[in-house]
Image: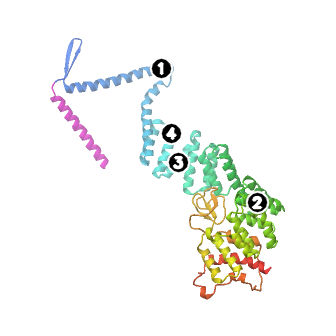
Amino acid sequence: MLWSLLKILVFVAIIALLALGAGFLMETSGGVQVTVAGTEYTLGPLQSVIALGVLVVGVWVFLKLLSLLIATLKFLNGDETALSRFFDRGREKRGYQALADGLMALASGEGRLAMSKASKAEKLLQKPELTNLLTAQAAELAGDTRTAAETYKKLVTDEKTRFVGVRGILKQKLADGDTETARKLAEKALALKPRHEETQDVLLKLQTQAQDWAGARTTLTAKLKSGALPRDVYKRRDAVLALSEARGILAEDATVESQEKAIEANRLSPDLVPAAALAARSYIAKGKPRSATRVLKKAWEAQPHPDLAAAFAEIAPNETPAERIKRFTALTKINPQHTETKLLVTELNIVAEDFPEARRALGNLAEIAADARSLTLMAAIERGEGASDAVVQGWLAKALNAPRGPQWVCDNCHHIHSEWAPACEFCGSFDTLSWTKPETPEISSATGVHMLPLIVGAIEDKSEPVDDPVTEVSEPVSDDTETDMPETDSDEDTIEGVSEPVLEEERK
């Protein structure tokens, strides 16, 4: 209503200006004198303006007639489309102008206006391969998903625009959360354009979410061949996929095949901690402890990690603490100054009840790199050396509020994981988990002090308690100190993580 009123006002204003201009010209003296064939014609100001307009129109008509004459001559000479092109030229010009206006409206975020211009362009141009794409994108912008879906289906029917149509429907399925259909569409789109990087990334993400590891490895190879992925990154991610495939097979109890996949994953990326640990366990299952030792030593050289120590302990699960310390020397002499190496040596000596050596191995880690693990080990050392309950409880109190230490952290969203995974469970990013100290609030991990039972072996139940000062760490805190030590799950887990391995050795 307001727009119609505005147009009426503009029209009235234009008429008033024209009338004012005509009145001004009529009152103006002078004019234009034209001599034709000896006859002189004098035109007033208003007549001169009218004559100029007639002249311009006459020239335009003359040029049109000349173009029609030329088209007719071409038609008579055998060009059957000359006349049709002449009459279609104006329509095409208006159609392309409407198409250009639609693109500008789309870029400006005006979805409804873009749809209107696309419809006008379709009527004038009769070229759906151009106008359908504009219509689909304009409908998406305007929130008309039904029209967009119908238009994308039209694009799929044309071989020239099939990829665009499939990609458009793929984006709609992703927005709707239909990942299974989206994965099939992504596979179809990649078959149409194998070198399309965006489609490769989308398909790889969908395949990892669906745990289609074999398909993901094929997509990863396509990225390498298209030049979208460096070879070193490809080798690393291929190892991650091979490892994920091996873990899946292991869950299905296909032992032989899982062993081969795990060894392949370690061969592709020897520094990948989960692959090295799984490959070592595969060698252990095959009765090849030397191969398992070689794999773990190489991985420990790249990055010391509790999972590697746990796998190394499984090579000889029934050895004594002294024998274990001696055998672990092959591992601990590599990167001896690394924090993880020092913590491992400390744990081994605590299990062997060599507390002075455990203190020397731990050094000042409980002060300069204080975390829950180092502080708990310090509490175990103090208990083993006969310190008072107040001293032990002081270290444990510090451990309750201390950071957990390195965790599996997503480099993309910084989400913390309790165990390694090929993709982040929060943001879905592939191969972004790193073993590092998180900058965000932390969660409990399956590693750290909880790794001690893996190093010592299974804990046997005994009916008779052992009267020894070392085992008192696992006893309840006395009533007079109950207010200083709040009863939390973290406290219980921390105490048990130290006391149970030591208790087991005492029982033996």
Label 4 secondary element: helix
Nearer-N-terminus badge (4/2)? 4
Cα distance, mark 4 to mark 2? 61 Å
Q: Position of residue 106 (x, y in %)?
A: 45, 45
**Within-10-Å neighbours for mark 4: few <14, some 14–19, many 20+:** some
- Mark 1 to mark 3: distance in Å? 42 Å
Residue tagged by mark 4?
130
Which is more N-terminal, label 3 or label 2? 3
The residues colored magenta run 1-29
> Distance between the Cα atoms at labels 2 and 1?
85 Å
Q: Secondary structure at mark 3?
A: helix
Q: Which badge, 1 or 3, is on the more N-terminal residue?
A: 1
Q: Residue at label 2?
A: 297
The residue singled out by tag 3 in the image is: 150
Residue to which mark 1 is pinned:
74
Mark nearest the camera among 1 and 4 is: 4
Q: Local crowd at mark 2 within 10 Å, few (<14), some, or many (≥20)? A: many
Mark 1–mark 4 distance (CA, rounded to whole Å): 30 Å
Q: Quadrant of the C terminus?
A: bottom right
Q: Main secondary structure of the magenta part?
A: helix
Magenta segment includes 49: no
Distance from Cα at disc 2 to Cα at disc 3: 59 Å
Quadrant of the image occupied by residue 30: top left
Mark earlier in primary sequence (4, 3): 4
Q: Are marks 4 and 3 in contact (CB under 8 Å)?
A: no
